[in-house]
Amino acid sequence: MPTVNGKLITQGHDCLETLDTLKQKTTNTIQNVQTLEAQMMNLSQQQEQKYAQELNTIKNHLNQLDKRCILLEESISRQFVQFIIVSICSSIFGLFCLWYWFGTPHKPKSQTQVGILYITKNFKLSIS
């Protein structure tokens, strides 16, 4: 065996040990990288599932809001039609009342009572 300054040098044996340790370290790092890749894949899949669930809940909520909007639009249109009908009927009733009010002659109270007496006398005469 070779000696340097009186010390034995075992180069071949040390090289083999360093090669073995390097192989072990590289396999360990490769395994670590593979486990990290697997963890990253799992995390990304979990994130994708989470995003998909959130999208589904948002879509469901939007569908519910859309249905509510449709119901509100229908009720508003029904109420508007009812309002128009009530407005038209009240206008017609008001015009009828005005026509009746201005169409009937307004006589003083004494003339009205005389007219009533005249009608009752004539009615009694025609009956008898």
Image: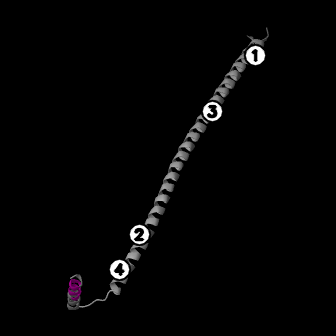
Q: Amino acid at mark 2?
A: Val
- The type of residue carrying mark 3 is Met
Vertical arrangement, residue 58 with respect to residue 20, above or below: below
Three-letter code for the amino acid on which mark 1 is drawn:
Cys
Of the residues under marks 3 and 1, which one precedes in the sequence? Answer: 1
The residue positioned farthest toward the front in the image shown: 128
Q: Which residues are magenta?
A: 118-125
Judging depth in this view, the residue of 58 and 122 nearest the camera is 122
| Dominant secondary structure, magenta | helix
Q: Which residue is mark 1?
A: 15
The label number, if any, that marks residue 97 in the structure image? 4
Q: Are marks 2 and 1 in contact (CB under 8 Å)?
A: no
Q: Residue at x 50, y 49 (%)?
A: 64
Q: Which type of secondary structure does the marked residue at label 1 adopt?
A: helix
Task: Please tell me whether mark 3 sits on a helix, a strand or a loop.
Answer: helix
Disc 1 to disc 4, how far (Cα)? 120 Å
